[in-house]
Image (cartoon, rainbow, N blue to C red):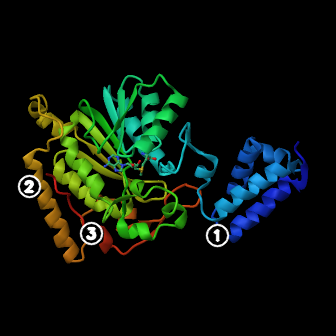
Amino acid sequence: MHTSSDVSIANALAAATERLRAGGGDTPRLDAEVLLAHVLGVARAALLTHPDRALTDEERSSYDVLIGRRARGEPVAYLVGARDWYDLTLQVTPAVLVPRPETEGLLERALAWARARRIRTAVDVGTGSGALAIALARALPGAAVYATDLSPAALDVARANARRIDPALNLTFLHGDLLAPLPEPIDLIVANLPYIGEEEYTGLMPDVRLYEPRAALVGGPEGHELIARLLSMAPAWLRPGGALFLELGPPQAAPALLAARAIFPDAAIRLDNDYAGLARYLVVDIARWAARDDAHHDSGRVPGRVQPAFHGACAGGDRVVRQQARAGVPPRLARGQRGLARPHRAHGNDAGGSRRHEPLPVHRAARGGGCPSLG
Ligand SMILES: C[S@@+](CC[C@H](N)C(=O)[O-])C[C@H]1O[C@@H](n2cnc3c(N)ncnc32)[C@H](O)[C@@H]1O
């Protein structure tokens, strides 16, 4: 039997909001509403239309538990087991990164590019919850979409999301490192890989650092290493006329840009800012490079092998960055990238939303820049 407590929705929300605010939460009212709506099994709007409805004792105690966990920093998305992202509701567990709003910007750019062409294949590298892969497969029904991840637990979450959202999607999940598990060449590579440096990681807000998987956040000592390794693998997998769309953090923008220029010297390469004005998206459109290299692509090259020519080019880029870093000069950056003139440190947020940033001295962008070992 459900006994009614003397606590109304309005009072429960007010008390929970106060508790979360006192604990330093950035969005206490929003979190309190999302969690209460979850406990009651109603939409958030219903809380406002029935403020006098009394909570049962069971509802009140479940709500108390969730508010306590939230006050200790657990992301709301893990507490309710889901996150709305783009036009999807994705189930999330602590095995996957909570999809961020910035990644919608990556998807929109990739879709705008893909819709202007007839692409046959696309891949989401490091799929996590499956957000990008599922959205791509829904928007590009004519393409075979692949999604890779190193984490079997993440792939389980992504597969379950895809099955629940649309079991008929032309979407294949593959376990393995970056592009290595792919069975065929690719027109469109999209990736939101881990891109936080080890030092940056120690400065992340506890909500992110203590709850989200480290393997989904840290991209190497400086953060850009995994992105650079993906760039170095891409020439062996991209079809002529293909493109890469990569999400990154401002500190990784300069090294990633240099690596891309070295690996794809003739490609159209750009860095776009996110809505906060921070460098966030690296776009490499290889149309021209591929046209020049068509014979090579059609010659039955074995995927997975990087061409020796790229080793030299990338090593050169690396040298330039190190020289600039020694001289205290930031690498040459794309014009108009205000976010890049003042690199930022990623911080992550409370409710599994955006990673946030604070200014860093300029030299960090230059330090450690350059290419990965391409062997
Ligand atoms: C930042 S999360 C992004 C998840 C999802 N794409 C999104 O945007 O929400 C990065 C993902 O890359 C995966 N990952 C890390 N290293 C990888 C590698 N070498 N190859 C493939 N996936 C990797 C992690 O397991 C994690 O799921």
For mark 1, give the secondary structure: loop
Across and down, in percent, residue 191 comes to 36, 45
- 236 over 232 or under it: above or below: above
Task: Residue under label 3, please give it.
Answer: 366
Amino acid carrying mark 2 in the image: Gly
Query: Which residue is most to the bottom?
Result: 327
Number of other residues with Cα within 10 Å of mark 2, as a class: few under 14, some 14 to 19, many 20 or more:
some
> Sequence-wise, which precedes: disc 3 or disc 2?
2
The answer to whether residue 175 is seen in the rendering is: yes
Left or right side of 366 for 314 = left
- 347 over 146 or under it: above or below: below
Query: Which residue is most to the front?
Result: 1
Task: Residue under label 2, please give it.
Answer: 312
Quarter of the rendering occupied by the N terminus:
top right
Question: Any mark on residue 130, and which?
Answer: none
Q: Residue at x 67, y 70 (%)?
A: 23
